[in-house]
Amino acid sequence: MITDFQEHKTLRDSYDVCIIGAGPAGITLGLRLAAAGWSVLLAEGGGHDYAPRSQELYACTSSGLQLYAEQTRLRYLGGTSNHWAGRCRPFTPSDFSIAPPGDLPGWPIAYAEIARYLPAAMDIVDLPAGADFHAINTGLDGDEFEPDRFLLSTPTRFAQKYATALEQTPGLDVFINCNCVDLEFDPASGRLAAVLLSDYAGNRQRQVARQFILAAGAIENARQLLNSTSLAAAGVISKDGLVGRCFMEHLNIDMGTFILKSGLDPDPREYYTTDAFIEHFKIGKGNVRAALLADVQTYGRTAEVKYFLETLACDMGVASKVAFVASFSCPGDGIISTMIEQFPSLHSRISLLDEKDALGVAKVNVNWVLDEQDRHTIKCIGTELATQWAKQNLGFVKLNDFVYDTSVPLRLSPHAHHMGTTRMAADARHGVVDRDCKVFGTDNLYAAGSSIFATGGASNPTMPLLQFAVRLAEHLDARMSAQRSAAA
Ligand SMILES: Cc1cc2nc3c(=O)[nH]c(=O)nc-3n(C[C@H](O)[C@H](O)[C@H](O)COP(=O)(O)OP(=O)(O)OC[C@H]3O[C@@H](n4cnc5c(N)ncnc54)[C@H](O)[C@@H]3O)c2cc1C
């Protein structure tokens, strides 16, 4: 049942599981754990729709590259799935077997551990069972790039798709306008004892549960951990520790422009780096998209032709008959965009500010920065792509100077894929959560969503984070069942 916490504070005394945040990760976990017979509280900070009082709680400062973190995340039921684009690409085995350069390890688990949850995750985002992630073009002749393979979700809007299930699943209590404002850790037991929940008038309620899951997105998961004075006092979370560090994005680099050779297929071309290429150059993975521009704002040949036709049409008084020219996409100039892997780095981080939000939670600063290794990745992918295009006689690529000259500031934009702030590792020296997504140093506090990503690859994060969410639901079900049997 969905209840408004602002109006009714009718929570049970205790729940088996308390989940913070009802985006794709939280909704998936809540429905699965309740279906398995557990009592579940799904506490969502926002309401049914966008509201400034909720969205403003996402306000943060930025000291690094511009992330647009306030605008891109949505803080209401369904989370950022209310405007995600639905592009789905799974991780591949090499994402889990090739460690990033530097001192930080890669994933502590094998790809097989999440591969078996792919069908369930595909079903959640409405991809047909057994559908192949297919290539949209034939790729390049060299060994560096292969055709990219992905599928498009409808895109699934989680609040709408699961509206009935959230209302009617027995054992599941969804509370909206129900903000987590503190985590209360008990050092004697090593367990999180309770969370503090607040409505928008500042009325707080302490809520007990056996297991807790943070599913509030990568920036907020780290923020909740850093904001907890009891976790800090117990030494579980340290402000200078790994929580909030290794913040990663997928890089959308404005690589440059291209002119396609006349007569070639004008459809967009998408390529993906091969494992051999990334291993040879010790670089991150990348998707590259070369697409023709469809309007007259382009430079060079296409612009000239379009200008000529438009002028001619006006002179002859037949402008309306040739209006299609402005929207017609012809072989000519295009742009090259990317989705490139950023390696985990301690310098790229979320940290707590002294300033508090309207509900008394410390705000955060996002210092999204890139390392030399990331510039190396961008340079290798850009220059190799241009080389392969020339070799295959597809046309001409004009790279922007910052692609090959790393002293020139980059022009890039984020993809709103926030990852890595509570990274998974084999031990607490290298991460925040263990193989089961449990926060090191606690017995019953878990994290869900792309904050747990040890590396981000160049795959869109939502379907993979759902694979992890289904895996976590299965793990918690097994763990709580074993505890119940032991107690009986
Ligand atoms: C424009 C855009 C396009 C995108 N396109 C794609 C795409 O094509 N493919 C892809 O894979 N990904 C895409 N993404 C990313 C995708 O939206 C996220 O990966 C996904 O939504 C993350 O799910 P989540 O459940 O972890 O977090 P979120 O969706 O961010 O949900 C977190 C939830 O927690 C709630 N919350 C936060 N703080 C609190 C609190 N203190 N107390 C209680 N509740 C709280 C929020 O209100 C929210 O409902 C896109 C993102 C954007 C912005």
Image (tube, grey):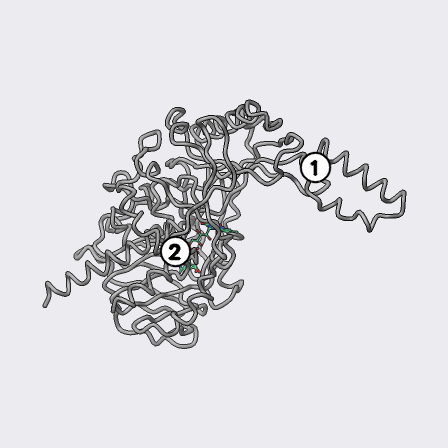
* C-alpha separation, residue under disc 2 versus residue under disc 1: 41 Å
For label 1, the SS is loop
Query: Which percent across, then down, holds residue 426?
Result: 24, 41
**Toward the viewer: 277 or 14?**
277
Instruction: Bin the neighbour count of mark 2 within 10 Å (Cα to Cα): few under 14, some 14-19, many 20 and up.
Output: few
Instruction: Bin the neighbour count of mark 1 within 10 Å (Cα to Cα): few under 14, some 14-19, many 20 and up.
Output: some
Circle on res. 298 = 1
Relative side of 371 to 447, left or right: right
Q: Is residue 211 above or below residue 431?
A: below
Q: Is residue 394 above or below residue 349?
A: above
Q: Indicate which disc, 2 or 1, sits on the residue closer to the N terminus.
A: 2
Circle on res. 129 = 2
Whether the residues at callouts 2 and 1 have beta carbons within 8 Å, the answer is no
Quadrant of the image occupied by residue 243 = top left
Query: Which percent across, then down, holds residue 387?
Result: 54, 23
Q: Residue furthest right?
A: 316
Q: Is residue 126 above or below residue 151?
A: below
Q: Quadrant of ligand 1?
A: bottom left
**Amino acid type, callout 2:** Ala
Q: Residue at x 31, y 37 (%)?
A: 106
**Amino acid type, callout 1:** Thr
Q: Nearer the viewer, mark 2 or mark 1?
A: 2
For label 2, the SS is loop
Circle on res. 389 = none
Relative side of 384 to 164, left or right: right
Q: Residue at x 47, y 59 (%)?
A: 156
Query: Which percent across, then down, holds residue 389?
Result: 56, 27
**Toward the viewer: 287 or 72?**
287
Quadrant of the image occupied by residue 459 = top left
